Amino acid sequence: MKSPLKGTDTTYDVLGIGFGPSNLALAIAIDEQNARLPPDERLNALFLERQSGFGWHRGMLIDDATMQVSFLKDLVTLRDPSSDYSFLCFLRERGRLIDFLNQKTLFPLRVEFHEYFEWAAERVRHLTAYEHVVTAIDPVRDESGAIAHFDVVCRDPGRPGRTVTYRARDISVAVGLEPHVPPGVELTERVWHNSQLLPRVAELTASGAPVRRAVVLGAGQSAAETVDYLHRSFPDAEVCAVFAKYGYTPADDSPFANRIFDPEAVDVYFGAPSEVKQSLFDYHRSTNYSVVDMELIEALYATAYQEKVAGRERLRFLNVSRIRDVLTRPDGSLDIAVEFLPTGDQQVLNADVLVHATGYRPRDLGTLLGEAAKVCLRDDGDALRVSRDHRVETAPDVTAGIYLQGSTEHTHGLTSSLLSTTAIRAGEIHRSLVSRRVAAA
């Protein structure tokens, strides 16, 4: 453990690591409360982000794709409906409030919601430091021997090869998910994860390279959207969807099922025995995992049927199938071996593009936290123990706090990585930060 550094200019009350929607919501909660307090009572906060500006799933901002959660589940409304950081206030400022209301929808375009996030992020720009890649998080002991702070070490964007260190009493980790591909898959110019869909398609289109066939692996919402987008983007290409299911599974967005995303459901889940937690997760995974909006399912089926009637089938669904091998030819095209699971028969598809729409997974917090991970307590399944206020449980000699926004499905349920309770969670963490500061004073 590190001894106190001499000459440290600022000790922050909280440092945010990652600046996606979750830590953005926390920054807003802090900034709004600070504006109502005298300077000596304000939380001193800074949020570190590796990107050069705010960005959220940019590679999947398809022009006509809509959000899967209501606009009321924005960054603030469920925490404070009067906040001027709401999506409706954003629309008013942009001059689109009445136009949006006339659509009679709860679900904005994904592109527009990203614009809303950027608008909110710019308003708290004074609390952010972009182009800061965190390389280490080191516990720091005070004169009594307690771990009272963390030093967060980043690459210095202004001095290549150098680092800059920030000290904080608490940290809020919100680094999001990372793209997942099957073991052994190497991403190339022709083999992508769907998170890079838009820039990759733009590159291919600009190069003028012909696309005769594209293959998409996966059966969730992103996979179906990728199939649809490639089919529209390359009007002369055949697009093949490969998945192990018999057909796409509709997302369960019925009112009672959606209550699993209510704030009260987090309390129920948190207090439940482990076997009940697992049952709830299994029962309601169809609200979010490997499922597709019914409207998109029906649109894809209608397109496939229309093509069959016309005698030119560009959209193909290879169900109950898996990709067994991928070989690259000298000309750069791909030979993709697809097995039909009921019989074991294989066919080889020569394709120009293979897209893995195979989801995301939590980042390895042990690697990210580094030395700080050693002071965190774990349960019998080796998962981090997390309290109801989203703070990691730590060794008795630790007074500094680590808050998690994400990677808490095992303790807080399905909403851990979703937008549904982002505003509520930000409020809970903010209250916890304030109460801890008051208690320490």
Image (spheres, rainbow, N blue to C red):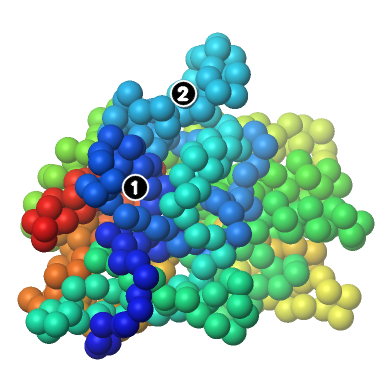
Residue 238's x, y, as percent? 78, 51
Do we see residue 252 in this rendering? no
Which quadrant of the structure image shows residue 169?
Answer: bottom left
Do we see residue 220 in this rendering? yes
User: In the rendered image of this protein, does residue 15 appear above or below residue 101?
Assistant: below
Q: Quadrant of the N terminus?
A: bottom left
> Count of labels shown?
2
User: In the rendered image of this protein, does residue 408 appear above or below residue 31?
Assistant: below
Residue located 51% across and 14% down the image = 101
Q: Quadrant of the C terminus?
A: bottom left
Q: Disc number at residue 79?
A: none
Secondary structure at numbered mark 2: helix
User: In the rendered image of this protein, does residue 408 appear above or below residue 63?
Assistant: below
The Cα atoms of the two marked residues, 1 and 2, are separated by 19 Å
> What is the three-letter code of the residue carrying label 2?
Leu
* Residue designated by label 2: 88
Residue 56's x, y, as percent? 54, 50
91 displayed left or right of 272: right
Query: Quick one: 38 or 59, which is closer to the camera?
Result: 38
Mark nearer the N terminus (1 vs 2): 1
Query: Tag 1: Cα neighbours inside 10 Å, few (<14), some, or many (≥20)?
Result: many
Mark 1 vs mark 2, foreground winner is: 1
> What is the three-letter code of the residue carrying label 1?
Leu
Residue located 14% across and 75% down the image = 398
Query: Tag 2: Cα neighbours inside 10 Å, few (<14), some, or many (≥20)?
Result: many
383 displayed left or right of 198: left
* Residue designated by label 1: 26
Which quadrant of the structure image shows residue 354?
Answer: bottom right
Residue 330's x, y, as percent? 86, 80
Name the residue at the right extreme.
208
